[in-house]
Image (cartoon, rainbow, N blue to C red):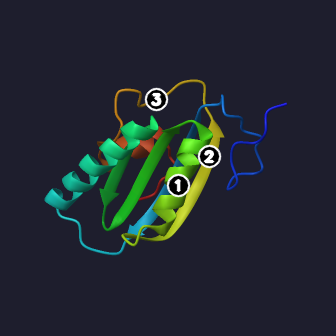
Amino acid sequence: MPKPATKYFPEENYTELDLVSLSYVSDATEEFGILALMQLVDKASRRNKSLNITGVLSFDNGRFGQILEGKPKDVELLWEAIQKDPRHSNVVSLGMKRINSRRFANWSMRLCGREEITSANPDIKL
């Protein structure tokens, strides 16, 4: 029997073969203009590509909302880094769930508007 692939979400018995989606919200600890956001997305896109993670990021009124997709161990590795990132405070997971396919398969990271991300996950409140 496969061992669970996560430590932060033990309520589920994820395996290395599963595909998951993790959503969260957080408050920014610094001001983000459009240039800073584009640089953040560019860096995140490169990192996510190396981890085979896809997803979207939204930023509005000093709040981040993000949806990440990938293998549980990869998503959890990134989740751990996000929680330690000094640009975030009040980081709140909206949960990780098993998915059948990637909703954002073409984007290692894409910046989207509040309406787009809330239509993908209504629990994300920005």
Which quadrant holds residue 92? bottom right
Type of the residue with mark 3: Arg
Secondary structure, mark 1, is: helix
Could you tell me which quadrant the C terminus lies in? bottom left
Q: Earlier in the sequence, mark 3 or mark 2?
A: 2
Would you say residue 82 is visible in this rendering?
A: yes
Circle 2 or circle 1, nearest the eye: 1
Q: Which residue is mark 2?
A: 96
From the viewer's perspective, is residue 59 above or below residue 44? below
Q: Which image quadrant is residue 29 in? A: bottom left
Label 3, on which residue?
A: 103
In contact (CB < 8 Å): disc 2 and disc 1: yes
Q: Is residue 123 above or below residue 102?
A: below
> Who comes first in sequence, dot 3 or dot 1?
1
Q: Residue at x 28, y 50 (%)?
A: 43
Tag 3, which secondary structure? loop
Residue 15 is situated, as x and y percent measured from the top left of the image, at: 71, 35
Kindly identify the amino acid type of the residue bearing the numbered disc 2.
Met
What separation in Å lies between label 3 and label 2 (alpha carbons)? 14 Å
Q: Which residue is mark 1?
A: 79
Q: Are marks 3 and 1 in contact (CB under 8 Å)?
A: no
Corner quadrant of residue 27 = bottom left
Real-space Cα distance between discs 3 and 1? 19 Å
Image point (27%, 55%), residue name: 40
